Image: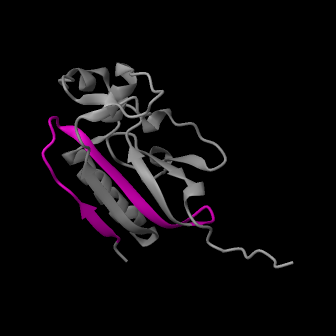
C-alpha cells in the first residue's frame, strides 16, 4: 500500500525550509508513530549562502535564551524542495508498506527564536533517532535522521486495569 502523501507548497524567503515527517503504522510497540525527518549535518558553505536577515522572530519559550547558532540549525536541518522530493521518493521506495503517510510543509517564517533544533535532542527511554544513512540501501547524497517520541503514541496492545 502506498502511503498518503500530503505536500503543502508555499512561498518561503530562502531555498531551504521544508519540513518532512512520516507516520509509521507500528514501531517499537507503538502505533501510528510520527517521525520528524531532518538533516543532521551540512557544510559551512551551505550556511554561508543563506541571508539570515529577518528569518527569526521573538523567542517562543519564556525562559529561552536566543542563540543565533542554534536558531540557524533549525533552518539548516530542514530540506530544499529537491531534497524534500528525494526524501519522499526514498521513503516511498523503501518503506511504503510500513507508512500511513508522508507529510511535508514549508516552515513558517519568521521562525520563533530559541526553539531546540532536532539535531540537538538527546535520545532516552522514549525519545530516539532513526539513522537512515546507516541502512545498507541508503543512497541519498546527504545524511538523514528521524526523531520520534514513543510516549506520544498509543501502545499496539492496549492494557486494561484490573477492577479490584
One can see residue 144 in this view: yes
Q: Quadrant of residue 51?
A: top left
Q: Is residue 68 above or below residue 120?
A: above
> Residue at coordinates 30% horizontally, 21% vertically from top-left?
44
Q: Nearer the viewer, residue 136 or 107?
A: 107
Number of numbered discs visible in the structure rendering: 0
Q: Is residue 100 above or below residue 41?
A: below
Q: Is residue 13 left or right of residue 44?
A: left
Tell which of 91 and 49 is nearer to you. Answer: 49
Query: Based on the displayed image, in which of its 4 quarters is residue 112 positioned?
Result: top left
Q: Nearer the viewer, residue 59 or 13?
A: 59
Q: Is residue 73 left or right of residue 161?
A: left
Extreme-right residue of the structure = 164
Residue 150 belongs to the span the image colors magenta: no
The magenta segment: 3-30
The location of residue 42, given as percent across then percent down, is 34, 30
Quarter assignment of residue 26 = bottom right
Q: Position of residue 93 (x, y in %)?
A: 35, 64
The C terminus appears in which quarter of the rendering? bottom right
Q: Position of residue 92 (x, y in %)?
A: 34, 64
Left or right: residue 125 compared with residue 104: right
Q: Main secondary structure of the magenta part?
A: strand
Is residue 76 shown to the viewer in this render? no
Amino acid at each position: 500500500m502506498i502511503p498518503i502523501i500530503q505536500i503543502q507548497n508555499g512561498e518561503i524567503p530562502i531555498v531551504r525550509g521544508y519540513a518532512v515527517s512520516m507516520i509509521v503504522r507500528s514501531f517499537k510497540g507503538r502505533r501510528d508513530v510520527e517521525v520528524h525527518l531532518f538533516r543532521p549535518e551540512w557544510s559551512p558553505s551551505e550556511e554561508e549562502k543563506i541571508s539570515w536577515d529577518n528569518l527569526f522572530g521573538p523567542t517562543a519559550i519564556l525562559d529561552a535564551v536566543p542563540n543565533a547558532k542554534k536558531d540557524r540549525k533549525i533552518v539548516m536541518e530542514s530540506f530544499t524542495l529537491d531534497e524534500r522530493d528525494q526524501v519522499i521518493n526514498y521513503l516511498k521506495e523503501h518503506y511504503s508498506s510500513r507508512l500511513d503517510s508522508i507529510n511535508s510543509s514549508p516552515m513558517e517564517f519568521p521562525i520563533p527564536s530559541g526553539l531546540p533544533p532536532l539535531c540537538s535532542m538527546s535520545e532516552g527511554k522514549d525519545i530516539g533517532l532513526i539513522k537512515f544513512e546507516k541502512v545498507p540501501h541508503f543512497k541519498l547524497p546527504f545524511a538523514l535522521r528521524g526523531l520520534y517520541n514513543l510516549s506520544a503514541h498509543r501502545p499496539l496492545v492496549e492494557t486494561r486495569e484490573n477492577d479490584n
